[in-house]
Amino acid sequence: AQSVTQPDIHITVSEGASLELRCNYSYGATPYLFWYVQSPGQGLQLLLKYFSGDTLVQGIKGFEAEFKRSQSSFNLRKPSVHWSDAAEYFCAVDTGGGADGLTFGKGTHLIIQP
Amino acid sequence: NAGVTQTPKFQVLKTGQSMTLQCAQDMNHEYMSWYRQDPGMGLRLIHYSVGAGITDQGEVPNGYNVSRSTTEDFPLRLLSAAPSQTSVYFCASSRDRGVNTEAFFGQGTRLTVV
């Protein structure tokens, strides 16, 4: 069965510093990978997705992620964080596509220090 | 364009009470699903539907019922609420499954069972 591991429950970063959130997945076939963000009291917003092709994908809000098949990883990065990036971030793998096929990691809570 | 709409946003129930969480989408999506989000657990799939009249169980279906009488609506019913069902519930929809399919999420319903 597929699984997603986000090793960091909480991460604290200073405003303006760079960010990397880790995500490792377990899935036998080529995965479809996603990063979602949940701002306080809000729903889930898709940041970016990987289906195939270029392993470095660009998303919204200045985020990017790199798919590394050899490491089964899909880490999320941002060169300079803003206070508004404080949120919960979820990595997900999609085994069949669509609203019912997502397996989520447990999330990483990002705290931004002034 | 409302997307996925969930009502209510907040609800407090007593143990044993019943209620229905509403989910509606206006994108004519065939696939709809319900997830629950618990601290440190990420999101877990409760039930899903691949079209009107068709539903199936996800990872954590016990204590919940669903039906899909129309393409637009996918209500989630708690017949006898239990404290273990205290959670944040998200409804999602997608056009189909497969490559380049994106799931759209509602804003969530925060349910507390006392």
Image (cartoon, rainbow, N blue to C red):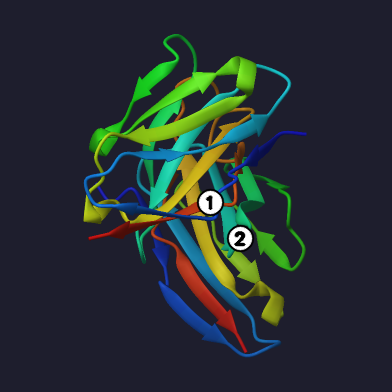
A105 to the left or right of B80: left
Residue drawn at (64%, 39%) of the image = A4
- The amino acid pointed to by label 2 is Gly
**Where's residue B51, x and y in %?**
58, 39
**Where's residue A44, x and y in %?**
41, 50
**Where's residue A21, x and y in %?**
46, 40
B66 to the left or right of A18: right
* Camera sees residue A112: yes
Residue at which label 1 appears: A107
- Which chain's residue wears label 2? B
Q: Quadrant of the N terminus of chain A?
A: top right
Label 2 and label 1 in one chain: no
Dot 2 and dot 1 residues touching (CB under 8 Å): yes
Residue at which label 2 appears: B40
Quick one: B48 or B12, which is closer to the camera?
B12
Question: How far apart are the two marked residues, 2 and 1, measured between alpha carbons?
Answer: 7 Å
Instruction: Name the image quarter holding residue A47.
Output: top left
Indicate the secondary structure of the residue bearing disc 2.
Answer: loop
For mark 1, does the 10 Å Cα neighbourhood hold few (<14), some (14 to 19), or many (20 or more) residues? many
- The amino acid pointed to by label 1 is Gly
**Where's residue B76, x and y in %?**
59, 63
